[in-house]
Amino acid sequence: MNTKDLAYFQELTIQKNFSKVAEIFEVRQPTITTAIQRLEAEFGAQLVIRDRVHHSLTITPSGQQLAEHAIRILRDLSMAHQEIQNLVQNQISLGLPPIIENYYFPKIAAKLKAKRLLRNIITVEGGSVDLRKGLLAGNMDMALLGSIEPLSYANLMADEFDRHPFYIFVSKNHPLADRKRVFFNELRHDDFVLFENSFVHNQAFNKLTRRNHFRPDVVFRSNDTHIIMKLVAQNVGITYLTDIVDHQDNVVRLELMDEEQPEFITSIVYRTSHILTPAQLQLLTIMHATLKG
Amino acid sequence: MNTKDLAYFQELTIQKNFSKVAEIFEVRQPTITTAIQRLEAEFGAQLVIRDRVHHSLTITPSGQQLAEHAIRILRDLSMAHQEIQNLVQNQISLGLPPIIENYYFPKIAAKLKAKRLLRNIITVEGGSVDLRKGLLAGNMDMALLGSIEPLSYANLMADEFDRHPFYIFVSKNHPLADRKRVFFNELRHDDFVLFENSFVHNQAFNKLTRRNHFRPDVVFRSNDTHIIMKLVAQNVGITYLTDIVDHQDNVVRLELMDEEQPEFITSIVYRTSHILTPAQLQLLTIMHATLKG
DNA sequence: GTGGTATTATAAAATATTTTGATAACAACA
DNA sequence: TGTTGTTATCAAAATATTTTATAATACCAC
C-alpha cells in the first residue's frame, strides 16, 4: 500500500472535499477519487459517504479508524525522514528553552567545542511545552526541558539533572523591595510581567494563584527574560522566575515562604524510539557530566 | 512510498539476507535489492552495509532508526486492517483471561443475548499479560484484564470495575486445613501448584515470596483453574488464587494475614486510538452497568 | 588453482500501478 | 434552464515495480 494514499485520505478527512485535496497535493482530482477507491478496496470497507444531497462528506466509523492510524503512520514516516537526515549530516538538533540556553548552554559549549561537536549542534528555541510536543513530533533529536513535575511520558526518556526554586523579582522602588521573604498571598494586588504561556513558569505560577485564590493582573507577557527583567526594573510589574536568569541591577530577589512550592526541574530528554548516534551519545555524556550534581 | 518496501526492509533487518527475505515474501531476489535501493534513495542514506568479505550484513544507524519506525508503521497498518474487518463484520473481539471469563462473563451473557449482541462477540483467551500485549498489537478490540496495580498505559483506556483479595487454597488433608488464617511466611516449605507465567497471579505471588525471602517449590503450572484445584484437592500442592474461582469440595480456603497484600484488580480495557462502534459502546455500557459496584 | 556454492547487483523486458485528460453524472442554485 | 461545484468513469499515458537472465564477488572444498 502506498503511503501517499493515506496522506490523501488523511487530508480528505480534514477538507471533506476531493477537489480541494487534489489542489493541496497538486494532482488532478481523479487521483484522489481512485486513491480513496484503492483504500476502500484494500480495507474492504466504505471509508467516506459522499452525500451529494446534503452537500457534505462524512467519514464512516471504518474511515475514522483508518484516519486514526493514518495520522500515526504519516507522523512516523516524517519522523524517520527528519531523524535520518540529521543522522546523515551528523547534525544534532537540540531543543532549548531560552532560560535554559542562557544558563546551562555556555557551561557545556566549551567542552563541546573541544570535542569538535559544537558545529554539529543546531539549537531550536521555544518554551518547554512546545519543545516537548516538537520532540514527540520528531522535530528535534533531544531537548533540555524545564518542568514542575518530574517528566514522565511513555515515549520519552527523561533524565533530571537540576532543580531550582522560583523567586519573586521586584524593582528596587517597589514597596516590598527591602523585604527578604514574602508569602505569595501578599502579591494579590500586584501587577505581573510574565513569560508567554508555553513556558512551564506559568504552570507553577498558576498553581500558586489557584492555591491562593486570586486572579493575577498580568500586564505583559514576553518570551525574553531580559525584557521581563527590564520591565521589572522599571517597576512596570513584578515577576516570578528562577534565579538562573541573568542578574540585573535595580531588581531585588525575594524568597517565597509558602509551603510545598513548585520547583523548576531541568531534564535531558529524547524519544525512547530514537537510536542515539555516537555523536549524540557523546553530547549526552558531556551534558550528564557537566550539568549533573 | 510503498509500505511493502518497509516490510521487506524490516524482514531484512531480522534475516540479514536478501535471498531469504525474497523467499519469505515469495518474490524474486532482485525485488528486495531494488526495494532497499528505493528506500536508500528516498531517505538519502545507506541503510545496510553489504559486507561480503565478512559474509555478513549490518544495519547502519540510519537503518536502525528506520527499522524502529517501520515496525510501528507496519503494526499500525495491520491494526487498522484488523479493526476495520471487525467493524465491517460488526464483530467485537474480546480478550478474556479464563478466570475472569468463568466468573464475570456469565453475568453479562444473558444481557448481551437480550440485546442481540452475544453472537457478535468473539472471545480470545489468554493470560492477562499476553492479552494486554495482544490488545496493544490490535489482535482484539477490548479485553477484561486482571492486574495487581491499577492499569496505567499511555495507549490504553482502563476502567477498573472490581477488586478481590488473594487466598491460599489447601487440601482438606493438609496440616493447615483447620486454620482460618495464615501468614504467607508459614508456607515457605510447601509445594505450590500455580498458573503459567502470563497470569498476573504470579506477579502477586512473586511479590509475596520476594518480600518473605523464600524460593517457592512450584511443582506444577497450568492454564486451568479446575486442574489446579483438582491437584490441590489431591494434596499435590497448595495454591494462591482469588475466590472468584469455582468452589471445590475437599479444598479449604485460608485468609492471608500479611499487611499490604496485592489485590486482584479487574478492568475493562481498550486502546485509546480505537474508535468505538455503537455495538462496542453498548457492550461497554452493559459491562459497566453489570460489573461495577 | 579450479569448480561449486551462496550471495547481491545490474539491465532490459514484462507487469502492474498511478496519474492524467476528457468527459459524464448529479444536485444545488440563481 | 443554464451555470456552478461537486465526484465518478474510462482509456491512454506516465510511472513504478517485479521478473528474467546474467554478472560479479567471495567463500569453501578438493
Image (cartoon, coloured by chain):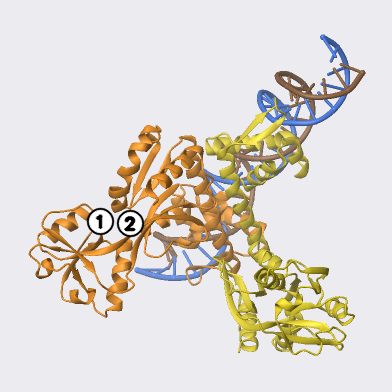
Chain colours: A orange, B yellow, C blue, D brown
Q: Residue at x 80, y 68 (%)?
A: B217
Q: Is residue B1 visible?
A: no
Kindly identify which numbered label has been placed on residue A127: 2
- Most foreground residue, D3 or A33: A33
Q: Say which quadrant the C terminus of chain B sits in.
A: bottom right
Image quarter for residue B260? bottom right
| Whether residue A267 is situated above or below residue B87 in the rendered picture | above
- Number of other residues with Cα within 10 Å of mark 2, as a class: few under 14, some 14 to 19, many 20 or more: many
Q: Position of residue A53 (x, y in %)?
A: 51, 71
Picture coordinates of residue B219 (x, y %)?
84, 69
Residue found at x 18% / y 74%: A187
Eyeballing the image, is B12 above or below B141?
A: above
B21 left or right, relative to A242 = right
The three-letter code of the residue at mark 2 reads Gly
Callouts 2 and 1 in the same chain: yes
Q: Is residue B115 visible?
A: yes
Describe the element under mark 2 as helix, strand or loop.
Answer: loop
| Residue denoted by label 1 | A223
Outermost residue on the left side: it is A173
Q: Chain of mark 2?
A: A
In the rendering, at what x and y percent does residue B137 appear? 65, 61
What kind of residue is marked 1? Asn
Pointer 2 and pointer 1: residues touching (CB < 8 Å)?
yes
Q: Secondary structure at mark 1?
A: loop
Disc 2/disc 1 C-alpha distance (Å): 8 Å
Chain hosting mark 1? A
Q: State the residue in front, A8 or B146.
A: B146
Residue B166's label in the rendered image is: none
Q: Nearer the viewer, residue B194 or D24?
A: B194
Q: Is residue B256 left or right of residue A91?
A: right
> Image quadrant for the N terminus of chain B?
top right
- When the figure is inspected, residue B7 is found, relative to residue B108, above or below; the finding is above
